[in-house]
Amino acid sequence: MQSWKDKDQDRGKLFSRRAALLAGGKMLLLSTLVGRMYYLQVVESDKYQKLAEDNRINLRLLAPPRGVIYDRHGEILAHNQQNYRVVVVPEQVSDVTLALDALSEVIEVQDFVRRRVMREIRRKRSFVPITVRDNLTWEEVSRIELNATSLPGMQIEVGVTRAYPFGPSVVHAAGYVAAVAENDLTGDPLLELPDMRIGRSGIERQHDQALRGTAGTSHVEVNAFGRVIRELSREEGRPGKALTLTLDMGLQSFANSRLASHESATCVCLSIPEGEILALASHPAYDPVPFGRGLTSAEWQELLHHPYGALNNKTIAGQYPPGSTFKMTVALAALESGMISPSQRFSCPGHFVFGDQKFFCHWHKYGGHGSVDMAEAIAKSCDVYFYKVALKVGIERISAMARRLGLGAPTELDIPGERSGLVPTREWKKATTGDIWHQGETVNLGIGQGYILTTPLQLAVMSARIGSGLAVKPRLTRAIGGVPVDVPLPESLGLSPQNLAVVRAGMHWVVNREGGTAFKYARIKEPGLEMAGKSGTAQVRRITQRDRDMKNTDTKKWEWKYREHALFVSYAPTHAPRYACAVVVEHGVGGSGVAGPICRDVLLEAQKRDIMRSGGVRMARAD
């Protein structure tokens, strides 16, 4: 039996072994820790020093200045200007609501602004400045600075905003910028900057990439919470490219002033043969600036439900029956096919009976136009003549000529939103309605009614092509970054000069000879500046037999939306066409008396401005 002394020795030995094991384990752990610390602090020191530096130094992108947009003569249409805004820093204010109350005693702070500020405060860190109001006037900035002691947490910051010196008068061409939406994000970090704005319409959207420029950079030192301590270095971004448009802002403003007396109207004026758009006016319009700061719900709803469609660029997106302005197309289709000669005469008794339908001439009250040839039929706008010609020529030849003159397809003008209009064919009718094309529809097409739809821009292009015999194509951009846009001169349409001369003679007669429908209203009396043109009055609602029986045929007395559209197309000067113009006055009723004078004034102004710039010497017609 083991004595108590032996047992005590065994317990001592066991304890010593365990102590040794524990000590060894501790030494192993300590060695591992020391080794790891050595590895991190010595072997990997460069790596972690760099990571620490990266955490301390942040690289931030700076939104570059957006490119300036000019008209053809150097007038600024869109540029950047200083924008003063007041911000609140939540951590510097004990009660944001009271701070906003104090600010509202100095400048106006609307309820929706308060709600937005409170939403942003909940989403962001307390040291991040929240914009309360921007686009402050200098007077508002002064009032805030004078009351700075009673406005804790409120600061004035200086930013950049997009400015449009001519405001609504050029918005449908130049367009506007707005904040980046979620569906605009493409992975480009520049788009995620809070002050970044991108083009939403017009030239601003068409050339957005060129106008954006290249981002700048700012190196800032931050603490562990991301608060900026100081800026270490800064490199400003490269501004976007400047754009030069073909617009003549003087003529653009003039055209807008001539449209202003009508509820809804549009005017396009372009140069021949270059196709440069000199005026692209759509009335009514809207102020582009609020889009940059962000529209309120009330502002957006007001624009969206504007009774005359202020948001709609009618020059390229408005689609109208061309009415009698289409008669030149029908005439050229007839002449080019050889089915009608210029001297061939048709009798107009004031109406035309086809099947069980009676088609009236606008001259029916006076017993019709009598016997007329092609030039006279154009000049006096004889419907019966073109009813008969259209039937003889047929839908396919008329449609083909319409497309040749620029109708029924986008002109490819360099701004988004252009609509194609519609030139009907048998195949289109069958595919769209499931019905065949009827001859009565050809009769209606002969005077630009029925299914056919055109845009004002297409009508201006049609006029330019008739006046020049060339396939004129419109454009709005003249230079990008100072480099002229290379555009080839248009090719010949391949139309017979003799046939074109007949149609031009009719258009000349319209405004320059007694009996022409616009002689009393749209004649340019200055020698050498005369214009040729054609009026059109496009029905929105047919005058029914019941209207005739009830003597309800004076459409000027009808509700505005049911009145006819007034159209006029033209070019000038007649001896050497240099400019083409088209005007549409929605529900204006009289093409000659309403739209004609606007065409006359715009073409006269264009020629006078041309003469002034060339020192009194008129420009010769381009070959």
Image (cartoon, grey):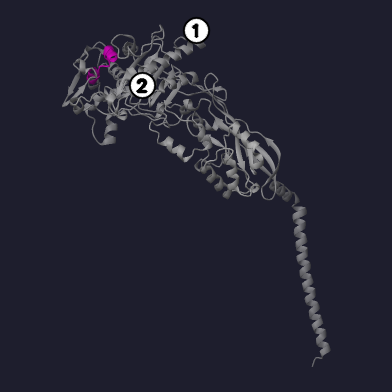
Kindly report the secondary structure that dominates the magenta region of the rendered protein. helix
Q: Is residue 383 magenta?
A: yes
Q: Residue at x 64, y 38 (%)?
A: 147
Residue 317, compared with residue 28, is above or below; it is above
Of the 4 image quadrants, the one containing the N terminus is bottom right
> Between residues 187 and 73, which one lies in front from this camera angle?
73
Q: Is residue 268 left or right of residue 224?
A: left
Q: Residue at x 23, y 17 (%)?
A: 363
Numbered disc 1: secondary structure:
loop
User: Can the viewer see residue 177 in this picture?
Assistant: no
Residue 421's tag is none
Q: Is residue 605 magenta?
A: no
Which region of the structure is painted magenta? Answer: 374-388
Residue 41, compared with residue 429, is above or below; it is below
Numbered disc 2: secondary structure:
loop
Can you tell which quarter of the image residue 547 is in?
top left
Q: Which residue is mark 2?
A: 405
Q: Which residue is mark 1?
A: 616
